[in-house]
Image (cartoon, rainbow, N blue to C red):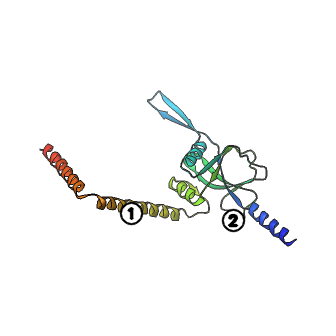
Amino acid sequence: MFRFLTITAVISFVSAQCSDKLFFEKNQINQYTRYSRSRGHTRSSVPALDWVMDLEKNAFGKHLYDEIIRKDDILMLFAYKSSLGLHVYKVCRSVPEKVTGPLLQNSENAMGYHFQMNDEHRLKKHLVNYDFTLFGEDESALRREIVEDRQQIRRENQLLREKRWNDTSLARKIIHYFWVALIVAFICGIGR
């Protein structure tokens, strides 16, 4: 009996939490580009689909084609970008204990695209890097982390270049310096 109650408690706790699925609300943007005073062109785009495809291409997760929103699903606003009119929701089975954004409880009429994320923290950094507003997150801390990651990559690349240069033979270094001197002499000669 105790095992049954423990398993039931664990199942209810897990089901109350939000899943690792996101819902990108479908929208359409029409942008008018003027060519001249009398002519122009209207371009339509679907930012939600563009973002889902881009995230899948960059290995942030997987686009779920066969997923539907159930009646009891609650969508919690995860991120948004005003310039695109794009809202990204987190799919929850019930009201989560830690509500970080507005809830959309009547979600059965919502249209959009489902996305299964691999690494939520990496996705948050990516969205902040593209000027999304995140709910329940310190965006300045994420931006600092992005800067630190870039500096770490620069340091690693610098060390790799130094290692390659140190591993280069003396003959190749002499040829390299010869070509650099020849190019500098050529550029100085043309300037006269």
Q: Residue at x 22, y 55 (%)?
A: 171
Quadrant for residue 75, please give it: bottom right
Q: In this view, does 35 lie above or below 187?
A: above
99 over 38 or under it: above or below: below
Tell me the kind of residue under disc 2: Lys
Q: Residues within 10 Å of mark 2 (few under 14, many from 20)?
A: few
Residue 123 or residue 40, whichever sits in front: 123
Which quarter of the rendered picture does the C terminus lie within? top left
Name the residue carrying label 1. 155
Q: Which of marks 1 and 2 is nearer the N terminus?
A: 2
Relative height, residue 53 to residue 150 (above, below): above
Q: Residue visible at 76% across and 47% down?
A: 108
For the N terminus, the quadrant is: bottom right
The residue that mark 2 highlights is 98
Q: Position of residue 41 (x, y in %)?
A: 50, 31
The count of marks equals: 2
Establish if 138 lies above or below 73.
Answer: below
The span from disc 1 to disc 2 (Cα, nearest Å) is: 38 Å
Instruction: State the residue lying farthest toward the left.
Output: 192
Q: Nearer the viewer, residue 136 or 93?
A: 93
Q: Position of residue 186 (x, y in %)?
A: 16, 45
Find numbered disc 2 in the image and state the secondary structure of the residue it sits on: loop
Seen in the image, is 44 located left or right of residue 184? right
